[in-house]
Amino acid sequence: MPDVLIAISIGVIVLFGVVVALLSRYRKCPSDKVLVIYGKVGSDSSGQNRSAKCIHGGAAFIVPVIQAYQYMDLTPISLNVDLKNALFKQNIRVDVPSRFTVCISTEPGVMQNAAERLLGLQQVEIQDLAKDIIFGQLRLVIAMMDIEEINTDRDKFLASVSNNVEIELKKIGLRLINVNVTDINDESGYIQALGKEAAAKAINDAKKSVAEKDRDGAIGEANAQRDQRIEVAAADATAITGENDAKVAVAQSDASRREKEAEALRLATAAEKVQAAKALQEAYVAQQEAEQTRAALERASQQADVIVKAEIAKQQAEIAAEAEAEVTRREARGEADAIYAKMEAQAKGIQEILTKQAAGMQQLVSAAGGDPDAAVKLIIADKLQELAKIQVEAIKNIKIDKVTVWDSMGNGTGTPATAEFLSGMLKAVPPMNDLFKQAGMELPSFLGKDAASSEVIVESTPEQTVKN
């Protein structure tokens, strides 16, 4: 029992250790880092094996033995790039002190480049690599621009530097965050001279502007005094003219008022008469429309009575005809079904009779040893009595007692006339052999054979007379 407990304890400890080991291989990626899994990490969409798998903001299980992992820091890196003796298009050497801020990119493709080219490098090594790229691109941008263009349009210069530098940084997995150019200096003092020129121009422009403003002030003052005198005189004249115009306007206003009052009275009277005429006309039109509407209503009512009654009668006739047709169809269908059932029953009865007869004939042939002729002979032998009975029936109702025969003894033949009469009567019955021949058969040999025909013709004499 103690051994079993020890074995169970060891198993539990081993299982716990395995679970802990597996859980230790499950790695979570912080938000400021990139988890790079390398080893056997599968293939890409083109079917080629991937060198690494990058995860940002998630977690993954690291398969023991076949996979390993490292973290890449996403902390921004500030770089002081003091470019000296850079050559402009005018062959002027300048110093461009600037500061660039970069970091490892989290874009899928660029992050894969960072995993392939920056994994395992120290931050100092990454800074040196980024500086080399920035120096080269910064020199290239300066060589393509004029110094006046850079001095006057600093935003264009910064945009060109950002575009060129960021394209190259993405190739190693970095991303450009910010560019700050502090100042641009040249050995020849060209930029300083441009600054002095601009300052002198600004001072001169300011002095000129002040003199122009003084001149404009004096001229404005004189013009103001002149305008004042003119406006005062004009105001007096305008006042007198205004008074006269006001009096005339008052008189004209009174005349216009009286004229408008008369015109208004005339218009009002005419309008009243026009409105009265229109009202009378509208009343006539309304009465005419009412009469037309009443006539149309009456005509529609009469048409509706006739048409609706005719339509109802038509529908009733159609319904009655359809019902009668349906009854006829049902009766015909019932009679057809009855005839079909009767004929089917008759056919089944005939089929059953024929089936039984065929079965009986087959058994009779089997009883005759398989000889069909012998089977037919058996059937005939069985029906012989009925055949003889049918022959006798032919002369059954002859009243022999009412026949009178004058017998002359056969006219010397020795045969009585009565016997010959009966013999001839019996010969009127068709012989059995003839019946078989008429049916297309031959009389069986066991029923007898044909006797040689040896008929004796006896001429009748006048004395042999048969009377009924």
Image (cartoon, rainbow, N blue to C red):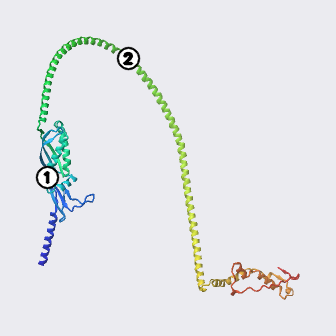
Q: Residue at x 71, y 78 (%)?
A: 438
Horizontal side, residue 98 vs residue 333: left or right: left
- The local secondary structure at tag 2 comes to helix
**Residue type, label 1:** Ile
Q: Position of residue 465 (x, y in %)?
A: 86, 81
Q: Position of residue 12 (x, y in %)?
A: 14, 71
Near mark 2 (Cα within 10 A), the count class, few <14, some 14-19 or many ≥20, is few
What residue did someone put label 1 on? 126
Extreme right residue here?
Answer: 462
Q: Residue at x 12, y 47 (%)?
A: 79
Q: Position of residue 308 (x, y in %)?
A: 52, 44
Q: 418 or 35: which is nearer to us? A: 35
Q: Residue at x 57, y 67 (%)?
A: 340
Q: Examine the rendering and report whether any part of residue 374 can be seen.
A: yes
Q: 417 or 69: which is nearer to us? A: 69
The answer to whether mark 2 and mark 1 are in CB contact below 8 A is no
Q: 157 or 314: which is nearer to us? A: 157
Examine the rendered structure and indicate whether residue 261 appears above or below residue 293: above
Q: CA distance from mark 2 to mark 1?
A: 101 Å
